[in-house]
Image: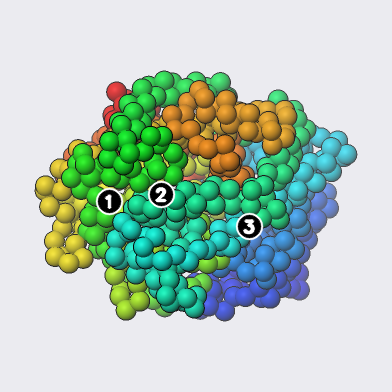
Amino acid sequence: MNLTTSNDFTVSNINNIDGFINFNDLNHNMLDSILEQSLSMAIQSLDQVEQTQHAISWQNLQHSLYNYMYQLNQIWNITNHLEAVNSSPEFRDLKNKFQNKIAGFYVNVGQSKQLYQHLKHIKEVEYATLSQEDKKIIDNEFRDFRLSGIELDQDKQAKFKTIQEQLSQLSTKFENNVLDATDNYSKFVTLSELKGIPDELLNQYKQDAVAHDNPELYRITLHMPSYYPIMEYCENRALRQELYYHYTTRVSEFGNAKLDNSPIICDILRLRHEKAKLLEFNNFTELSLYPKMAKNSAEVLSFLYQLADKSRSHALSDFTELTKFAKSEFNIDKLEAWDIIFVSEKLRIYKYSYSNWELKQYFQLDIVLNGLFKLIFDLYQIKFNLNSTIPTWHSSVLTYNVIKNDIVIGSLYLDLFARTGKQPGAWMNSIQDRFIDDKDKIDNKPMAGIMCNFTPPLNNSDITILTFDEVQTLFHEMGHALHHLVTQINHFSISGINGVEWDAVELPSQFMEYFTWDHDILKNISCHIKTAQPIPNELYTKIINARYYQSGLQMVRQLEFSVLDILLHQSTVFTSEECHRISQEVRDKIAVVIPPEYNRFLNSFSHIFAGGYASGYYSYKWAEVLATDIFHKFDDKNNQEYAVLGQKFYDNILSRGGLNPMLDNFVAFMGREPQIDALLKYSGIN
């Protein structure tokens, strides 16, 4: 059975002659037309499969349905990507127009009893003779049928579909509110109000004011490259407090009522619970964990509380030290949330004789990238060749051919700078999933985009400098990109990061972060903006001595959010008051730094309300156990040893996509199951 149509559509309609996506030409009108066409083709293909009475072979089913689903997924992913990096009313309207239609289509796929019967027949007749990839895809399909309500009656299936559509809309609204509230705030200040800010950053604030027709003053915003330096360096405590208030309340009842995410949070939690109950799970956490590594919430909470118990005494010690220093050096009787970053930086300088600003001057973006690319070559013999002919969605985006064994295996996009209309934070996104099918002559190489929000280079300068945290962020996201780019799995549903358990997907990214502490690698990625010298041994020693500075505070903060995520999604009461109660309960049990009552962190917690981490935020720590355990094998090795270990990591984990359970991949590399010792060691907690 082959699907035929007079308006056949392929992804190449948006690609140029070299196979790259025509981002230079794509606009919302073009995407509107392409989305209509690709969705129509996908719906037609599903209809034809459902109307087919005779048995369909696995190969024909792929040709007749999955190829069209791939095309739809690619176009929809590009639409969402462009809305995230260059948000505009037109792109938002386009996303709003299609998100219910597309969510509805995928629900229809997951609830198609006819498709279910075809796959059951394939499982009975063909399964034993199929490849490991095909078997995994089919196994995942039966799992996803369960999670789409295949066994529900017609009324409950309709309710499930409505819930999915509503959740899709609410998550988009949540994220848009965060973006708009961040974009909407700005403040003009005088030079005297910015005492303590390094000159280079003052120039940044001045240029921003000039660009907004106020050249006599300095402009600050809630975007991280603007907000964080105020919290870290500014001696003006009142200004720090004012910005902290606006940042932590920007999508709450204390801000613009139209952008308040409080009711959206309640609706999302309620709908997720209803969805879980429909599928006969006790709560959404049970549903979320169903396809993950962790067996149940008891296992997750036990893991988190165990780490909290081991970490809290360290965190209390960190906070006591900070409080005493604030009193002795700044006469601050009560250390407030808006003092933490500022006093922490001053204490770092006092204890270790270097500042973050001093360290930042060694990390020029170009040098960091070259050093990062060298490390990747040493590990995996993979090269990144700059290719400026690849079309991009913004003039600042860098593009590369990714090469292994003299063959181009994919493409990398680096969109690294903050700008208005771009979602905050840092993330890796699939620009194109690997999908290779010789029978259907499909050859789509993977494309990955790394998005960050670094400070753009100043006018008349090509030099961008990064903080050490930003260097680690870049290494982290490159780990995700490598996982996506070097996959040897051909089917899009399990290639790259697709199909990898969500609580394991951070393994390659966190693994890469730990290389930033290696002395030789730091030398390769550092070059002082004035002396052109790499980080000297004396400064490196100070960095290592400070490696576990406030590690206890950092650990309990992440554990607090992870436990809160689980407990919120196990709740059966969906009010703002209940969310605050649970937040306070978790805070009392785990936290050391207590924020002011008005702090509305949850209202901008996009990871769980607009991303893929609902009842999964624990994944960062869960995967870090895996990452540190593996990295311990690489620690202090030389380049020759890197190549041997890197090849083993590449073969067993990085290239495997979602083909095997990650625990099997881990055991294949390590020869045993994970142990927590390395995480405690690299966290400074033992």
Which numbered disc, 3 or 1, marks the residue closer to the eye? 1
Q: Compare marks 2 and 1 and give the one earlier in the sequence.
A: 2
Return the residue nearer the eye: 88 or 5: 88
- Distance Cα–Cα, label 2 vs label 3: 30 Å
Q: Compare marks 3 and 1 and give the one earlier in the sequence.
A: 3
Name the mark on residue 356.
1
Q: Compare marks 2 and 3 and give the one earlier in the sequence.
A: 3
In the rendering, at what x and y percent does residue 481 appear? 42, 54
* Kind of residue sitting beneath label 3: Asn
- Distance Cα–Cα, label 2 vs label 1: 19 Å
For residue 16, above or below residue 656: below
Q: Residue at x 74, y 39 (%)?
A: 271
Q: Which residue is mark 2?
A: 237
- Distance Cα–Cα, label 3 vs label 1: 32 Å
Q: Residue at x 71, y 39 (%)?
A: 266
Compared across the picture, whether 321 is left or right of 533 comes to right
Which numbered disc, 2 or 1, marks the residue closer to the eye? 2
Q: Residue at x 33, y 39 (%)?
A: 331
* Kind of residue sitting beneath label 1: Asn
